[in-house]
Image: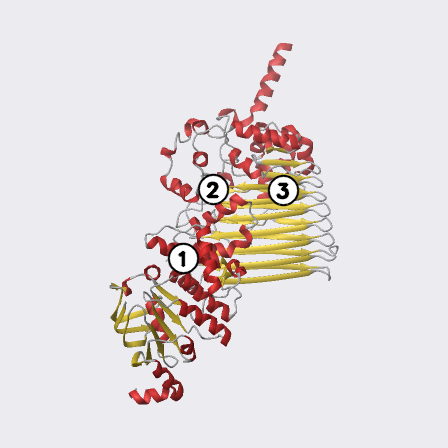
Amino acid sequence: MATNEHELEHLVSRKYKHGFYTEIDSDTVPPGLNEDVIRFISAKKEEPEWLTEWRLKAYRHWLTMPVPQWAHVHYPPIDFQAISYYSAPKRPEDAPQSLDEVDPKLLETYDKLGIPLHERARLAGVAVDAVFDSVSVTTTFKEKLAEAGVIFGSFSEAVREHPELVRRYLGSVVPARDNFYAALNSAVFTDGSFVYIPKGVRCPMELSTYFRINAANTGQFERTLIVADEGSHVSYLEGCTAPMRDENQLHAAVVELVALKDAEIKYSTVQNWYPGDEEGRGGIYNFVTKRGDCRGANSKISWTQVETGSAITWKYPSCILRGENSVGEFYSVAVANNLQQADTGTKMIHIGRNTRSTIISKGISAGRAQNAYRGLVRVLPTAEGARNFTQCDSLLIGDRCGAHTFPYIEARNPSAQIEHEATTSKIGEDQLFYCLQRGLSEEDAVNMIVNGFCKEVFRELPMEFAVEAQALLNVSLEGAVG
Amino acid sequence: MLKIKDLHARIDGKDILKGLSLEISAGEVHAIMGPNGAGKSTLAQVLAGREGYEIVSGSVEFCGRDLLALAPEERAREGVFLAFQYPVEIPGVNNVYLLKAALNAIRKHRGEDELDAYAFMKIIREKMQLMQMDASFLNRGVNEGFSGGEKKRNEILQMAVLEPKLALLDETDSGLDIDAMKVVADGVNSLRSPERAIIMVTHYQRLLDHIVPDVVHVLADGRIVKSGDRSLALELEAHGYEWLQQAVGT
């Protein structure tokens, strides 16, 4: 009897443990979203219970939220039940075994961008073992970072190794209920990066360098959390100039930054997801929530982004300027060509005294693309002496594209100083002819004019990426004129 | 060097050049004068290859080649230079960057090696001295926030660096005070050479006091109606264009 009971228990628990998915391949779930799927993801990642609950709460709230419609973008409704929310990384034997098997067009683009040979294979998704061994480089980086006390690794790893830090800061900047896509991300995020810089530490390297060598396939629901403790400093670069292959159409990432007293975070993004073909078929929908919290006095958060990819970009990297004298910055170049749509900008929320923010946005539209800048500057009654400067420039190439500017300003403190400048210009025939008359080709002329237009943003990028970003812009606008 | 034969050109359905003929040899400086709307600037634009003008008939031969068959950048690389009446601003693009790109595009076309930064800076410093320009100018945006005089000086500096075979100066004197005019004129004079032809388009004769032309043409209603030496310009100045129109019966 006792044995039988034991067996029964065993059976029950086994059934419970495996739930509905006992029937299927253990590395994927079928399309669809429900609480079991979320529990499955959480279990796969061996997460503590509080995190599972956190995900479930987010999911339950997400169910009550309508799909946002306010952005200046158009796309057919997304069937969230048709998406598979977890699949294990591809097995090496499924990936291309060498560059010879990769789309030549992709290789040509890498070539134009000057991507180093050893990185091309990784970007194209060639099985890593067949490419090169980055272990030694990675180890050197890891040792250097560990010496400084910097924690940098995948989000899953951080949940396992530093659960107290993750628990303290996760969702503290972008609450799970913040918006439709943030709630979805909170429920189903698979991985991402975690960074913690201890008090008074200046991160000994651009985290970009490390990231590029180590970038994991983080999938469509990426979660990033960066915490800069008092007096620390970090520069982080996400993404890559090279076009990334990805089969998932919907990308809904969440990035949270926390800067404590006297800390500084510089976050740079180069986004070049597949934009779809010339008719707009098959591109990525990039619906991202990025927000930084200047929690301590004299802290600073700076966002720099170069957005050239994706069929639809919908993102507003923002700063909550809570600490006294804290500073928020947003530098953006957004390019939309062919049928791409971009609705991007920032929010600067001034809460603390003498907080300052700067917004420099450069939108470039070509082909039949639509490019919108949407920005909010909000000064709360507590923000005595707040200042904002916004400059928002649009450049049109050709006459079938559009540029739109939606600035929102809410000042509830009479001492606030807010400046807004906006311009829209066409690449003038005059400018173009002037350059041609000096012997430049049309392509070089357009590149030169566009790069000049974006200069204020490019100089905010880490050096090596500024060069790549220029090359990227040139490739993105190829054939835009003439 | 340049042979224009019976050139007819129009823009937006309006005839501007109506049978213009002109020949200029290497080493010569020609001035083209005429009242507003005569077609002076159109001639400069058509020769440089600006879009929007329709060539109805006629031909232009430049160093034995059909100039009208070439794209604007090809004409530039072959040695046709236009100093613009209204040089455009290109924000964020450094002067020095544009100049280097232009010079190297032309050198490449000629089969010469592209210049590195060092060699290029050596050339440009020398030319800037000639145009009395400050070094800070190099890192400013192309014509961005330049005064009228600075823009015109910049055009001549570009000409000095690019060393064209044929230079078209479109109203280079407009908007210049007398000091700036002197600097610009000295610059142009120093670029006169047996290998180079210069066409100056101007409304006023005062520029010709500083840059003395070999031949003066009067352009009226899309045609050259009179050609002569320097004294023609002085007569025009004394009597005005109306005098001339009566004299030639247009």
Q: Secondary structure at mark 3?
A: strand
- Residue A470 position (above or below residue A58): below
Name the spot of residue B62 as percent of width and height, x first.
Answer: 28, 65
Q: Chain of mark 1?
A: B
Instruction: Say which label, 3 or 2, has the lower sequence index.
Output: 2
Dots 3 and 2 on the same chain:
yes
Tell me the CA gap for discs 3 and 2.
Answer: 23 Å
Left or right of residue A87, residue A62 in this image: right
Left or right of residue B200, residue B62 in this image: left
In which quarter of the view is residue B47 placed? bottom left
Label number found at residue B102: 1
Per the image, the residue denoted by label 3 is A256
> Would residue A173 be visible to someone looking at this image?
no
Tell me the CA gap for discs 1 and 2.
Answer: 43 Å
For disc 2, the neighbor class at 10 Å (few under 14, some 14 to 19, many from 20) is some
- Identity of the amino acid at label 2? Gln
